Image (cartoon, rainbow, N blue to C red):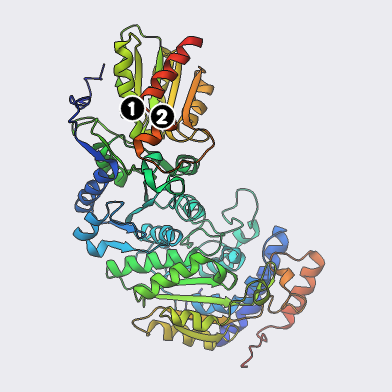
Amino acid sequence: MLNNKIFLNPKIFSPDVPRKASRDGFGEGLVVAGEKNKNVVALCADVTESVRMHLFRDRFPKRFIELGIAEQNMIGVASGLAASGKIPVVGSYAVFSPGRNWEQIRTTICYNQQKIILVGSHAGLNVGPDGGSHQALEDIALTRVLPFMSVVIPADAIEARKAILQAVDYPTAVYLRLARAKSPLITTEKTPFAIGKSQVFWLPEENFSGITVIACGYLVFEALKAAQELEKEGISIAVINNSAVKPLDEELILQWAKKSKAFVTVEEHQITGGVGSAVAEFLVQNHPLPIYFMGMKDSFGESGTAKELISKYRLDKEAIKEKVKEVLKFT
Amino acid sequence: MQKNLSEKELKKLAPEIRSKIIEILEKAGSGHCAGPLGAVEIYLSLYFGGILNYDPHHPDWPERDRVVVSNGHYAPLLYIILAYAGFFAKKELETLRKISSPLQGHPHRLSLPGIETSSGPVGEGLSQAVGMALAAKMDKKKYQVYCLMGDGEQQCGNTWEAVMLAGKHKLDNLTAIIDRNNIQIDGFTENVMPLEPLKEKYESFNWKVLEVDGHNISEIISALKAARSIFVKPVVIIAHTIPGKGVNFMEWEYLWHGKVPNSKQAEEALRQLRRMKGKINSELD
């Protein structure tokens, strides 16, 4: 059942549940961050409205810098601003940033320990019709490998709003991975959220010793739907919204590993180097247990709707249910 | 050391700095020779010619002028200048490139005072300098931002992205200095990837370009002063230098870009530099 201690949206499974993209929540949160802290500045590379930074630009025109299509320069400029006491929020599509400008991020941000907030919007398959060229499926690997970089994946617009506000005060650089597509509001304003903390969104029956599904971002909702339907079929699972990719919420992961037979991880990212890998790296050293990875299997995406794509690449509710049943057979 | 030495004093100091470069690189056993030897007058003019506003006892003083060294392989020269300026003890120079030394092979911001940014991968410094200059404008601060660049990194797309942005924002608080020594790892710049006409390139991006003989201290200082009084545009000073300047077998020899002398070569280099006290001539002398 839904974890009723964390004030999740009670209407989550109703057909009229409000839907909103995480990038929208981010855009609204950025304005609030700007109001709270005058050092917050925003930079964008010709995708201002897409990344929802226009709200900040219109509110604080003098604190917004339009770079044009120059993502490498954007990072260096952000580093220089950070060196001068600013808190730069740097937005683009994840394919371009951290995709195109990775070495600049490594050298001028991370090696230099200059704190910025790196916002990679349009991450994952949910980008949809723009196709494989625009669907970032490698960005988690690119960012979580970097020292001085934390990685956060909000599960909905409300978490994205909270994430940007917290990222401003967080001691390291933060990568915020956002989705283009609208998705149901799973959480509410009251749901706790913290960088470095993940949460169980779906609790299994008591005395559980089954499968825990670790999901993130846009796919948390799919995992919750799978949990709901599996429950009806008499299969009880746990679902963790693994918003904290780095630092990983080790305590929570360990706690649920000890209760579970196996983990299933699901992400809109290459299996290599993603969230599942982060969980596996930790567990293999602390509490080894079977882990099954759902993600991109060394392939790119393609055009289609978000719904069609997560279905075709076997990341939707049906695929999660199927995987859980399959895992139960051999564990 | 004083921040405003006379031109005569600076000239005298140049061979001493060059000798130090040879000494610490020989000890380090690896590093870059030609570039640092050629840029001695540029660094001396900036730090000791009455241009730069800094306080070695308060390296984070908010009103200080910023120096972004974009070509991090000039680290030996930068370290020597910073040590002479009093940011840290000169004896530290001997630890260059050694394990646990704050004098990393390429500058690391967090390891030493006086270093505004970590560098090494080239083509990124100007972006950071632009960011600092933009921040100064936002906060109405008066400091000047200097970006020291090599000519090889004028081949990087990132550099031109930054050039474009500085032109767009008319960053008159930004002065770039290009050490135009014509060499890079693979050979002469004009063979590897031609940069000329470099002056016209910058001008077309709305920069003011000044060209100087990079071994003529008086020319460098007047250009740096002029740069502070040019408004509405960022300024780039193209300083024409001779790579390996002062050591005859290193001058104009691109193979010395990323090489250091062995003990015999170092001995010969030091002998030449000793004899040349104050006699390094520029084209104009």
Residue position marked by numbered label 1 in the rendering: A222
Image quarter of residue A192: top left
Left or right? Give the position of B75 relative to A192.
Answer: right
Closer-to-camera residue (A11/B204)? A11
The answer to whether mark 2 and mark 1 are in CB contact below 8 A is: yes
Q: Mark 2 points at which residue?
A: A315
Mark 2 lies on a secondary structure that is loop
Q: Measured from the top left, where is residue B31 in percent x and y?
A: 67, 61
Q: Nearer the viewer, residue B263 or A56?
A: A56
Residue at point 39%, 50% (across, down)? A93
Mark 1 chain:
A
Q: In this view, does B246 lie above or below A152?
A: below
Residue A308 horizontal/vertical position (percent): 37, 35
Which of marks 1 and 2 precedes in the sequence? 1
Q: Nearer the viewer, residue B157 or B106?
A: B157
Q: Which amino acid does label 1 sit on?
A: Glu
Q: Position of residue A187 (x, y in %)?
A: 23, 31
Q: How crowded is mark 1: few (under 14 residues within 10 Å), some or many (20 or more)?
A: many
